[in-house]
Image: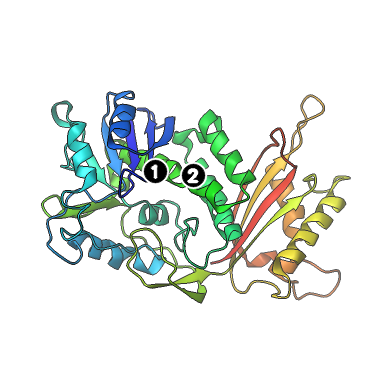
Amino acid sequence: MYVGVDLAWSNRARTGLAAVDRAGRLVDSASVTTDDEIVAWVAAHAPVRAAAMDAPLIVTNASGQRDCEREVSRVFGRYGASCHASNLTRPYFNPPRGATIARRLGWTLDPDPTYAAGVPPCIEVYPHPAMVGLFELGSVLPYKAKGGRSFERRRAAFLELLAHLESVDVLGLPANERWRSIRAAVEDATRPMHLERLEDEVDAVFCAHLAWRWREAPESLHLYGTPADGYIVATPPPTHPVSARVATVAGESDDRSTAPVAERPVMTAFEVRGVPATFATAGERPWRAAVHQAAVAAVADDGPLPGRLEVTMHFRLPPPWRSGQGWDLDNLVKPTLDALTPVLGRRAIAGPEQSDDERVDRLVASKRTVREGENTGATILVTVL
């Protein structure tokens, strides 16, 4: 097994755990609190080939930041993924909780991925920069609880994160029962606490995937720092564009970020209630009307978003009522985009109104059958690139 650990600072907060098999598929995930619970959970999923932990493991500096933290901040800071300072003046780093747990489990902190003599390596990872690199994000996804972030914004970003993770085929997430329950809980969430119960477990799934990559596809990752003074494993330095950002919010930053002020990406997120319909069918007109109405309510008096855009759509479809019935994803996308004029703006041409979907440079779409107790419809997120 490959194990991911999203470690809390203390044994009073929730720690996320996940395990993937040799093929990279998610086997199990959970959240616990104490060191003993972590050790017991991992022991139940032995043998472990490698582990990835979101927590400082090697801390030797008396003050300030570690070199690896400065390096990660230099490379990923423009995407909003900088690091907190880890040093020996902080009791929880002297010694680091993560290192103590790793040694109890018989793991080595040496990042060498060759898995010598049955001693699994436990590497330190930082999910935010790794997500930026792996998914080519223009900025970190704002799904964490931070000052100035609304619940609606966090939930939309959380759904986007789930969609990105589901795009990693080797994880096999759509077929995993526990993962399906996580997605349903996020979709049904109505309060911040509903998201916070799941954050650590979802981060642990990503950590487990990084552990798998470290052994099975090491060229896709990069080690920042040194094993002697501390290191962080993330993706190689990214070269893709940074998202345009506006509306600076004091105090908003991401986990392990040192920036006292972060900028909020421009985005609009909303739910559409109705029955999604494909292009050129009887249901297209009422579906387009439902999307348009929801988009008008979402933008209120702000008007269309500026610049180049990314659109994410997650469709919830009714069960098929006849054999062989289905919905082509591309035909679901077209009428939905066409109805997003309040968000995308109107194309500057003569004739009937047309959505300015030429400005959409990136499109993410998914579909699934509605679950018991859910409403059919879609979750839509539009972000300025």
Question: Residue 356: where, in percent of width, then height?
Answer: 71, 68
Can residue 1 be seen? no
Q: Residue furthest right?
A: 282
For image coordinates 57% across by 34% down, the residue present is 180
Q: Is residue 150 left or right of residue 287?
A: left
Secondary element under disc 2, as helix, strand or loop, is: helix
**What residue would you read off at disc 2?**
197
As drawn, is 47 to the left or to the right of 366?
left
Disc 2 residue type (three-letter): Arg
User: Residue 340 sits in which quadrant?
Assistant: bottom right
Quarter of the image that includes the N terminus: top left
Structure colour scheme: rainbow
Residue 236 sits in which quadrant? bottom left
- The residue where tag 1 is placed is 14
| Residue 64 appearing in the image | yes
C-beta proximity under 8 Å, tags 1 and 2: yes
Sequence order check: which comes first, mark 1 or mark 2?
1
